[in-house]
Image (cartoon, rainbow, N blue to C red):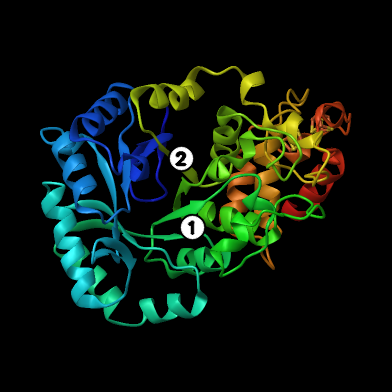
């Protein structure tokens, strides 16, 4: 298992994580079997957004005795009322649900205290300027949460969170289908039957978000990495071609700032399927060729940081160079930190000899030599 830095938190998380949702409505024994298997495979981060009491209790029982080995991503604002999940900002319910989480998980702290599910800008402002964030700060102060995070599906809200300097982790929905879509406050837009066919690559606000998070040290954990399974089905896929789970995982894990993908498992075999990513060949991980040849929608002309263009005779790490350039152009003037990073590269755009050998290997038709030239001028 590969472990990655979770932004600036100081935590190292397994790049394949455990999303708890599929553990609902399962027996305590089944939950324990899945969690034990995750631990045996090196998974060390688990997300529990669910408020349903039984699943919380089962997860708590399963990690009893090994609590310290787990990084728990727990949610604040996810409550259980009258037998059902309710997302709320009503503080009596919020506080009771968080206390319930601690009790049922048999712990006195949650590593990542996630402000649960904000997709609207106005709601973000209300939360960050009211009693909700005061409560979250209080939890952090007394050690009941170690880091403040937030979950959202909206890149515009995620960007606001990353800019606070206070929110260190964002649980964000990432897959190649969602990545084409512009920001929206309506989650149903992401699950619409018809994605349209005129999208061309990653929506700019998403590319900007990933770069911003990388720059600010905000760690991203990923939800909905399989787009609810529709990417596995040629007819349902907005690309007109099917992707495999390993390809979807690789797509998410090659976005800047991403540390771990939360995958749902019902059985130990499901865990094995996801952990197979760790030993998959580069051909098996290759989402780029599939997307580049897709009949519907396209990522043409845009660098997805897939690494297909290697090797460069001048030794340039082309995806890294492109990431740095894409990050730099977001700014009116190039920050010193990026200049320093550029200088530290053993080979950067200055080393490009414009041989264009890389371009014949880029499935997305990126004009790499031109991009290197632009980067050279930018970092001059
Ligand atoms: S330039 Fe092309 S091949 Fe290279 S990382 Fe970007 S998209 Fe992939
Ligand atoms: S064009 Fe530049 S970046 Fe591409 S392979 Fe040649 S030297 Fe490397």
Q: Determine whether 44 is above or below 134 in the image.
A: above
Is disc 2 surrounded by few (<14), some (14 to 19) or many (20+) residues within 10 Å? many
Query: In the image, is 226 to the left or to the right of 79?
Result: right
> Ligand 2 is found in which quarter of the picture?
top right
- Give the structural element (helix, strand or loop) at label 1: helix
- Is label 1 within 8 A of ligand 1 (CB to nearest ligand atom)? no
Give the camera-side residue of 143 and 236. Answer: 236
Residue 138, visible in the rendered structure: no
Q: Which mark, by number, is residue 261?
A: 2
Q: Residue at label 1? A: 216
Which of the 4 image quarters holds residue 237?
A: top right
Work out whether mark 2 precedes mark 1 in sequence or the reverse, and give the earlier one.
1
Query: Which percent across, then down, holds residue 210?
Result: 57, 53
Q: Determine whether 184 is above or below 192 in the image.
A: below
Is disc 1 surrounded by few (<14), some (14 to 19) or many (20+) residues within 10 Å? some
Q: Determine whether 126 is above or below 280 in the image.
A: below
Query: In the image, is 259 to the left or to the right of 135?
Result: right
Residue at x 59%, y 49% (from the top left corner): 340
Query: Which percent across, then down, holds residue 192?
Result: 64, 57
């Amino acid at each position: 298992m590969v472990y990655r830095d979770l932004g600036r938190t100081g935590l190292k998380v397994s790049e394949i994580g455990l999303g708890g949702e599929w553990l609902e409505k399962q027996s305590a024994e089944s939950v324990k079997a899945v969690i034990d298997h995750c631990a045996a495979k090196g998974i060390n981060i688990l997300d529990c957004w669910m408020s349903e009491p039984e699943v919380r209790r089962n997860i708590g029982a399963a990690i009893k005795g090994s609590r310290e080995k787990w990084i728990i991503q727990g949610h604040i604002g996810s409550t259980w009322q009258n037998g059902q999940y309710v997302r709320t900002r009503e503080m009596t319910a919020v506080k009771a649900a968080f206390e319930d989480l601690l009790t049922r998980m048999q712990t006195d702290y949650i590593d990542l205290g996630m402000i649960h599910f904000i997709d609207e800008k106005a709601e973000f402002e209300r939360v960050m300027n009211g009693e909700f964030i005061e409560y979250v700060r209080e939890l952090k102060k007394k050690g009941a949460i170690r880091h403040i995070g937030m979950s959202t599906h909206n890149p515009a809200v995620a960007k606001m969170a990353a800019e606070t300097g206070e929110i260190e982790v964002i649980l964000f929905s990432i897959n190649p289908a969602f990545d084409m879509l512009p920001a929206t406050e309506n989650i149903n837009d992401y699950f619409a039957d018809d994605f349209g066919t005129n999208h061309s690559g990653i929506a700019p606000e998403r590319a900007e978000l990933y770069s911003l998070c990388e720059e600010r040290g905000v760690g991203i954990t990923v939800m909905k990495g399989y787009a609810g399974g529709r990417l596995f089905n040629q007819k349902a896929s907005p690309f007109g071609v099917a992707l495999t789970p390993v390809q979807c995982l690789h797509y998410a894990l090659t976005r800047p700032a991403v540390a771990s993908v939360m995958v749902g498992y019902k059985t130990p075999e499901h865990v094995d399927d996801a952990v197979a990513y760790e030993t998959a060949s580069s051909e098996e991980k290759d989402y780029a060729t599939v997307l580049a040849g897709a009949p519907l929608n396209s990522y043409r002309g845009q660098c997805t940081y897939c690494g297909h263009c290697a090797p460069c005779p001048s030794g340039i790490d082309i995806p890294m160079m492109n990431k740095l350039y894409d990050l730099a152009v977001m700014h009116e003037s190039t920050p010193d930190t990026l200049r320093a990073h550029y200088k530290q590269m053993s080979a950067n755009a200055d080393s490009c000899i414009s041989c264009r050998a890389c371009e014949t290997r880029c499935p997305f038709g990126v004009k790499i030599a031109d991009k290197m030239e632009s980067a050279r001028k930018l970092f001059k």
